[in-house]
């Protein structure tokens, strides 16, 4: 396995940056000009700064947020992950004050890599389940 193996890079980014909040690794593993296709209402930044802001946004709302990868599929320069996100809504999240409720929902992410860094990102999460668990739906 090379240091630029997409499967390994996806695991390191998820475990170290997202789960352990090793924000010092963002400069090393995320390209300055990352193209981000993920929707984050109100997040107007771009590139690496946008990626870092999305990590902080998630953890500001769910300080104990954890992402457990259930599956990674990789091919050439891309890796796709299927994961379960859990956490307690104990901080402001996109304008929603803390509810104290826990969430448990599924996400899928795709990263494209070049020279050991993520250069492009796509992702989707089960927002409907998360909103229901936060008590935002009837």
Image: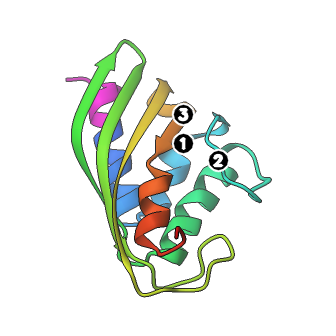
- Tell me the CA gap for discs 1 and 2: 6 Å
Tell me the number on the disc at residue 122.
3
Pointer 1 or 2: first along the chain: 1
Residue 6 highlighted magenta (yes or no): yes
- Tell me the CA gap for discs 3 and 2: 14 Å
**Element class at badge 1:** strand
Q: Mark 1 near mark 3, Cβ–Cβ under 8 Å? A: no
Residue 42 highlighted magenta (yes or no): no
Q: How many marks?
A: 3
Say above or below: 134 vs 105: below
Q: From where the camera sits, is residue 10 visible? A: yes
Image coordinates of residue 108 in percent, x first then y, are 40, 38
Which residue is rendered at x = 51% and y = 34% of the image? Answer: 118
Q: Which residues, given as a range, are shown in magenta? A: 1-9
Identify the residue position indicated by label 1 in the image. 30
Which residue is rendered at x = 34% and y = 56% of the image? Answer: 105
**Element class at badge 2:** helix
Tell me the number on the disc at residue 48.
2
- Tell me the CA gap for discs 1 and 3: 14 Å
Say above or below: 104 vs 32: below
Which residue is rendered at x = 51% and y = 38% of the image? Answer: 123
89 on left or right of 47: left
Pointer 1 or 3: first along the chain: 1
Quadrant position of the N terminus in the picture:
top left
Pointer 3 or 2: first along the chain: 2
Q: Quadrant of residue 132?
A: bottom left
């Amino acid at each position: 396995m090379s240091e630029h193996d997409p499967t390994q890079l996806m695991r390191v980014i998820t475990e170290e940056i997202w789960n352990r909040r090793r924000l010092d690794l963002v400069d090393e593993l995320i390209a300055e000009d990352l193209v981000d296709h993920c929707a984050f209402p109100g997040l107007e930044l771009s590139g690496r700064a946008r990626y870092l802001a999305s990590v902080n946004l998630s953890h500001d709302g769910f300080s104990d947020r954890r992402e457990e990868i259930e599956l990674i599929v990789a091919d050439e320069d891309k890796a796709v992950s299927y994961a379960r996100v859990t956490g307690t809504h104990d901080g402001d999240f996109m304008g929603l004050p803390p509810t104290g409720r826990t969430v448990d929902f599924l996400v899928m992410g795709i990263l494209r890599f070049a020279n050991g860094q993520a250069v492009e990102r796509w992702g989707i999460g089960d927002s409907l389940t998360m909103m229901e668990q936060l008590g935002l739906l009837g």
